[in-house]
Amino acid sequence: TSYGFRQVGQGEKQALVNDVFHKVAKRYDIMNDVMSMGLHRAWKDAMIAALNPQKRAGYRTLDVAGGTGDIAFRIIEASDRKAHSTVLDINGSMLSVGAERAEKKGLAENLTFVEANAEDLPFEGNIFDAYTIAFGIRNVPRIDVALKEAYRVLKRGGRLLVLEFSEVDMPLLDKVYEAWSFNAIPQFGKMITGDAEPYQYLVESIRKFPNQRDFATMISTAGFSRVTYTSYTGGIAALHSGWKI
Ligand code: SAM
């Protein structure tokens, strides 16, 4: 089903996505809690546990579509404030909120904020120990291009971790989840930003995103080895992992 939405081209898709996040940047963190009923915190914590960041200065990670900094902040804390993380996002409004939060948490020294596109990373190759992206990759118009870029900038032995909404594989939960996402999320979006359509678009993007197995295949195709995944909360979200060897 397309729920009455037109197909959009790549440029138009990115413009829509940018519009959503410019509008919500200041309320993004609270919206996340409301719309996921707080679950995103547990999923993010599980992602960091899977990464198990090294506790050494010189350990460098790149958090793409890093938005307001949730993943990068967790990585730095888990490394006993030794690691360095580059937060990259296409949206300056999201990064401004992130930079402000970083200052408040006293984490600014461990962070660099970069406004750029996941499809065209402004870094030389083989420099990061880990590449993370949480709830970002489904917004990127050309996912295969973003995955190739991830592979390029990682060191040999580097780790890719992707946290994303995925395919619900529990009989009752799928119905509840569908009702929640197609009705409640656009409603909240309208309440908070005055506009439901961008949220309908985001919900639609979740539905279009490949399931666990198909996304694992895409990661392998980009060159990664030992590709695995773990579903969280019945598949509402999934963590995919791969290595550059
Ligand atoms: N990672 C954060 C988190 O988990 O809370 C933010 C996720 S937010 C749902 C998605 C982010 O992807 C937004 O900040 C958006 O600006 C960013 N984004 C969308 N398209 C992008 C692209 N092509 N390159 C980099 N970032 C992008």
Image (spheres, rainbow, N blue to C red):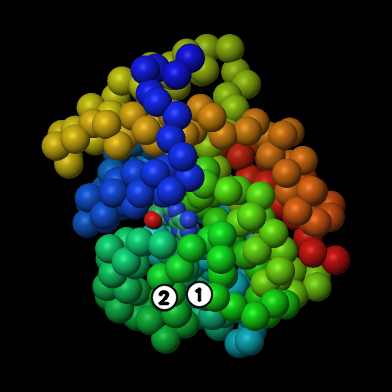
| Residue 156 appears in the rendering | yes
Label 1 beta carbon within 8 A of ligand 1:
no
Residue named by callout 2 = 113
Badge 1: few (under 14), some or many (20 or more) residues near its Cα, within 10 Å? many
Residue at horizontal 38 percent and vertical 23 percent from the top:
5
- Which numbered tag is attached to residue 86? 1
Q: Nearer the viewer, residue 123 or 163?
A: 123
Query: Rounded to the nearest whole Å, what is the CA distance between mark 1 and mark 2?
Result: 6 Å
- Residue 196's spot in the image, x, y percent? 23, 31
Callout 2: SS: strand
| Residue 55 appears in the rendering | no
Badge 2: few (under 14), some or many (20 or more) residues near its Cα, within 10 Å? many
Number of on-image labels = 2
Residue at horizontal 14 percent and vertical 37 percent from the top:
194
Q: Is residue 153 above or below residue 34?
A: below
Q: Are marks 1 and 2 in contact (CB under 8 Å)?
A: yes
Q: Where's ligand 1: which quadrant?
A: bottom left
Is 168 positioned to the left or the right of 190 in the image? right
- Residue 210's spot in the image, x, y percent? 63, 33
